[in-house]
Amino acid sequence: MPRFTNKRVLITGGTSGIGLAGAKRIVDEGGQVLVTGLNERRLDESRRAIPTAAVLRNDAADPSSADELAARVQSIGKLDGLWLNAGYAAVGTVEEVTADFFDRMMSANVRGPVLQLARLSHLINEGGSVVVTSSTSTYEGAGMASVYSATKGALVALARCWASALAPRGIRVNVLVPGPIETNFRDFMADDLRASFEASVVSNVALGRIGSAEEAAAVALFLLSDDSSYVTGSQYAVDGGLTMR
């Protein structure tokens, strides 16, 4: 039987990249998905790509987003899986960081997931699964990514606490730690800067290449499925060996 038959999964940031790849596969494996995003073009593309999905415009940086998601879930039934995948990235030198730069990143990447889980926790079935998307930036020490790295490190700490808090209900919480994955997540960079950045990263990847969104999503779906029924409080790096060096 497909792993997600009769399962309902909410994926924030599910209209592109790893989240979209995961949503497509969950549907292929018999599940129902709700995905969120902000970009109107990607929202429309997701509706066409996954006609059975509920595709919602939702901004994790907006404190009201958690209430909106909870209301939608309440209207259709409890979740079996929650993948907190939405995120925002920007880079800058230490001197370029401003209050607005800091607040925007923290609001989207840390406060958003915290408030979303706070509102959605009671809407997850016993024995369900929560997956949180962090990043190898947490461990890389890149000089231009201090604030982004801090937000992703905060998610690792939060997930460990959530794993303890939700364990009495049999709900597992684990962290996906993607490395260099071929998605649109670095589109904020100029083409030459992105090419230089990716070449530099790949030179430190044991497998010598950038991974695909599908490869990262496959690990997330393992964590969302009953295949990982005895796994909680863990981190799974999908980075081609980047962080082992």
Image (cartoon, rainbow, N blue to C red):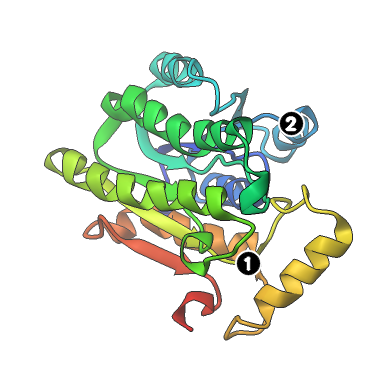
Q: Residue furthest front?
A: 95
Residue located beneath label 1 in the image: 180
List the residue tagged with mark 2.
39
Would you say residue 231 is visible in this rendering?
yes
Any mark on residue 59, and which?
none
Residue 2 is left or right of residue 48, and the answer is left
Relative image position of residue 61 (x, y in whole percent): 55, 27
Residue 99 position, x and y percent, is 58, 32
Q: How many marks?
A: 2
Looking at the image, tell me whether mark 2 or mark 1 is earlier in sequence order: 2
The residue nearer to you, when weighing 78 against 207, is: 207
Residue type marked 2: Asn
Give x and y (percent) for residue 227.
Answer: 32, 60
Q: Amino acid at mark 1?
A: Pro
Mark 1, residues whose alpha carbon is within 10 Å: few (<14), some, or many (≥20)?
many
Q: Quadrant of residue 183?
A: bottom right
- Which of labels 2 and 1 is toward the front? 1
- Up-down relation of residue 134 to residue 37 (above or below): below
Residue 90 in sight from this viewpoint: no
